[in-house]
Amino acid sequence: MNISYDHYKIFYYVTKYGSITRAANALTLNQPNITRTIKTLEAELGCTLFERTNKGVRLTPEGERLYEHICTAVEQIQAGEEEVSLNKSLQNGIISIGATEVALRCFLLPILGAYHSKYPGVKLKICNYSTPQAITALQKGLVDLAVVTTPADEIGSLNALKICSFRETAICGHVFEHLAEKEVSIKEIAKYPLIALSTGTKTYEYYRDFFSENGLPFEPDIEVETADLILPMVQNGLGIGFVPEPFLDGNADNICRLKIKENMPTRYICLIKNNEYALSIASRELERSIRDKCRTMSMKG
């Protein structure tokens, strides 16, 4: 038999949706053409493939046997078409990402490195934002994706996925190293100079709330714009700071970790996207890489 692939494709979609109308919409064809094609296919095969029902159509036993073979073939062809299209689209393009510094250093950088190695033609534009800034940029369509740290109260209707958790730890330099000899309370730490991210950041709000829950005001002596400035400030004896534990990997010279009596709340890194804006193929591929990493981490956890 020399039956057109398009006939089998239409048969596949009518079966998939159980409706000639819905299949016509999915294929952007009119219903008479769909009906005519199905009748032609039935004539070529010499059997009836569908029965009409009140809700649409359903396969006959002959149709079911045919669909078992056609389903695999059509989906394999579609997968091949998507792969070719993907490879072509990933030869160039640009992705704009709004990310907090903690999200970059504790999660995103290795993924960006692997992505750039695989798709060197795609340009990456990384905007280092606070969480509120990244969310605002995403809402305005200025970035394709946002990877931020909690708390993130402004998410609203945006699509958010918790990627991984992390905890922060209190650190000091040699000037206050005597505090590392025992467990200390937040109340005791509050007596010493504190170094923190500036007012208006979610990290500042996080510590303000944490201190408040323990009946204390949060009054940093030094406020910095980026988290990477906290380490050198602490190393030079300017006060006690709080940083994510991964920040100390390979950067713990002249640093003492403090054992805090109170439990530090868990924080999260989140992937956020705006469903009002369609992602490019390159952006979808990066999103897929992030989600794959998230699943891998969940399995290990």
Image (cartoon, rainbow, N blue to C red):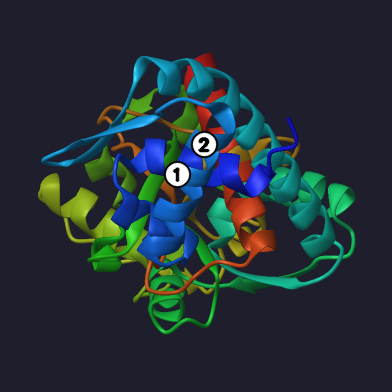
Picture layout, residue 61 above or below residue 74: above
| Few, some or many residues within 10 Å of mark 2 (<14, 14–19, 20+) | few
In this view, the residue in front, 82 or 203, is 82
Q: Is residue 14 above or below residue 277?
A: above
Residue identified by numbered label 2: 43
- Circle 1 residue: 39
Question: Quarter of the image holding residue 63?
Answer: top left
Q: Viewer-proximal residue, 61 or 254?
A: 61
- Quadrant placement of the N terminus: top right
Measured as percent of width and height from the top left, residue 19 is found at: 29, 46
The image position of residue 195, as x and y in percent, is 46, 61
Image point (34%, 42%), residue name: 17
Q: Residue at x 59, y 20 (%)?
A: 69
Residue 157: % across, % down: 24, 65
User: At 10% across and 49% down in the image, what residue appears?
Assistant: 215
Q: Are marks 1 and 2 in contact (CB under 8 Å)?
A: yes
Q: Is residue 57 left or right of residue 64?
A: left
Q: Is residue 121 left or right of residue 153?
A: right
Q: How many marks?
A: 2
Amino acid tagged 1: Lys
Dot 2 amino acid type: Ala
Position above or below: 218 against 254: below
- Marker disc for residue 4: none
Pick the front one: 284 or 17? 17
Q: Position of residue 163 (x, y in %)?
A: 46, 40
Mark 1 crowdedness (10 Å alpha carbons): few <14, some 14-19, many ≥20: some
Q: Nearer the viewer, residue 253 or 177?
A: 253
Query: Which residue is located at x 75 percent, y 41 percent?
Result: 80
In 3D space, how far apart are the residues under numbered discs 1 and 2 (Cα atoms)? 6 Å
**Is residue 98 shown above or below 239?**
below
Q: Is residue 153 left or right of residue 259?
A: left
